[in-house]
Amino acid sequence: MIETTGAEVLADRERLLRTLPHGEGINGIITTDRADKVLYVLSRYDDSVWWLPKSKSPDHAPDTLRKLDFTRIACEQLRSEAKIVLARKMWVEDSLGNASTRQTFDGLVCWLNWLHDQGISSQARVTPLVAARYVQYVHLLTTPNKPGKLLASQTKWNKLSAIERCWQFLRDTPCGFDHPWPESSAIALSGHKRSNKAKTDIIPDDILRQLFQHAEFLLNRADDLLKHRDALADFQPCSKNHNDQWEERVEFLKTRGWDQGPHALNTKLRDLRDGCFVIILATTGIRAHELGNIRRGEWYSEVRDGERFYFLGSRSDKTHEGTASWLCPEIAIQAVKILEQLSAPLQIALERELKKAKAVRDFKNVTRLEQCSNCIGLTKQKNKGNGVFLLSGNALYKRIRKFAKNLGVDWMLASHQFRRTFANYVVHHKLGDLRYLRDHFKHWSLDMTILYAMNETQDLELYDEIYAAFDGKRQAIVGHWLEPDTPLSGGMAGHIRQMRNRSEEVRTYKDRKEMIEAISELVYLRSTGIAWCTNDTGVDCAGGQCEGCEHGCIDDTHKPFWEGLYLQQIELRQIDDLDDSGSKTVERTMERCERVLTDLGVDINRLKEQVIDVEAI
């Protein structure tokens, strides 16, 4: 590796900026990185392969995604034009990550090789007609891993955007060309429509329950598993024969109460690691790469009004936020602590590798190892000399899929599903919908503005996703109220029925969806367990009397509660030694239930008959 200075890099960039339009004498530093406080050259302009800096990729991203191999472009002239486009893109959009640059490069490879196949050796010969033919070509392309399936509109957009990049960055060069589609754009031609609708699936309750329960079961066994591992690591077999050594280890573990052998122990430790990942993903809303960026000791807690709050720290690369933190329950911190212990032997091995890399001034490896150091998601890769690496996003995806498969879970699990599921759970918890992880979500019953104010380094985008999920849930509830056949009870029911019938007001909206969105924005909503409360002041709330309150609305989703309450009162009324006060309370409660259930369309007499039928059995 060749060391350099910031002044040399800037001088080379100035020289390249002057020479690029003419295409003569182009040379100089194109990419650099830093390791051990030393700035070193990664790639020069005239190299056939450019390496993007590790610092602009998530730590878990494989090195192959930083490689721009210009030999993939068949024609030398087109190859040189691609370098001009890439160099200018990297300088103009310096803050963007490597993924964006790599995406542009892949689009260029496809476009320029197509030109070569058409007998075009320079983009100077590109016309709108040539560009139109390429659009047709892209529309007929199929996905490599699914033969016969056409490319997604997003992928088409990425490929067509490469032509716009070439037009943008080659205009002052001899290979410049007119705008490829003066009356259109890459996004329009691709057919891609940006949508605010969430595409990521929410993990179903029963699936999440299975995953989390097993992960929690493994977490509770972590201390024993780690003690077995450490004891086995310290154990010294007497035999020199490999097979005999293995048998000695098996027998040694049996003396400690583990009779399944070393291989099964290692498998269980990997399951424990994956279970810890599941717990953190499910209870924080953190992204996969942010999970990979968590380092030892990057968490803290503080007490507010007698309540302890935990925060988990990491680095977010997607939105270039840098250091960020996430509010989390204590179980997430427990999972992090176990991951710290699980990765401890790998951290020792990493430090040995780092020492060797520094000794031979292998700055590229120093950069990689320093970025991985102290991360909780370390792993060894046998295909790379058994070196220590950070668990990649793809590897994490495979691990949690395997974790689910081993439980017999029939669900295409992906790490990004946890983020949307988390936002959905927070919303349901805030609305009083008691779901599986309610104990771990207790902090979210507080106002989110207060929660965010506790620590302004928190992941603000996650709060935006929670608000979006809340809006979606609120719109669904209000939309259900406005359905003409939805039975309603409570003080708000009359107002909502009037709103259904005022058809002239609907005409002021583009469609029913827009009307629901507008109305729901005006509605404060929380669950009392027996009704929906729309009182945004909290004043004059009697508590437990929602059916008579002007702010209360009871819909058919609350019917099971009121039926259950009514049946309980029937049973209580049959108690012989119930005093006069108790009898009056039961009668009043039954009258309340009958009013609500009648509004909700329940046949009261049939409900009473059910009790008689059960007693007869």
Image: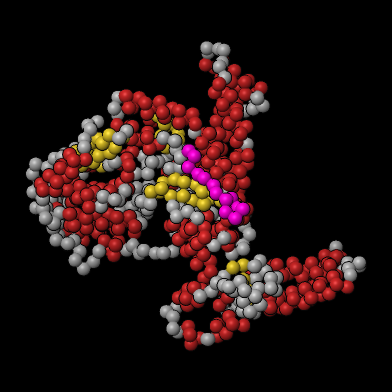
Q: Nearer the viewer, residue 31 or 85?
A: 31
Q: Is residue 601 visible?
A: no
Viewer-proximal residue among 364 and 379: 364
Count of number-bearing discs = 0
Task: Establish if 8 lies above or below 245.
Answer: below
Q: Main secondary structure of the magenta part?
A: strand
For the point 83% across and 67% down, the residue is 571
Quadrant location of residue 546?
bottom right
Indicate left or right for 307 with 43 as reference.
Answer: right
The answer to if 183 sits in the magenta stretch is: no
**Which residue is more in the foreground, 161 or 541?**
541
Q: Is residue 167 left or right of residue 499?
A: left
Left or right for 575, reference 246: right
Say which quadrant the C terminus sits in: bottom right
Residue 598 place in picture, x, y as percent: 71, 78
Which residue is drawn at the image coordinates 44% and 57% (left, top)? 460
For the point 68% across and 76% down, the residue is 547
**Image side of residue 607 versus residue 99, left or right:** right
Magenta region: which residues? 296-308
Residue 449 higher or lower than 396, as above or below: below
Indicate the position of residue 141 as horizontal and vertical percent values.
Answer: 30, 54
Q: Quadrant of the N terminus?
A: top left
Expressed as whole percent of the image width and height from the top left, the position of residue 437 reads: 60, 53
Q: Quadrant of residue 605?
A: bottom right
Q: Is residue 250 visible?
A: yes
Residue 532 at x, y percent in the picture = 62, 71
Q: Please say which color scheme the image uses.
A: secondary structure
Q: Residue at x 62, y 63 (%)?
A: 432
Outermost residue to the right: 576
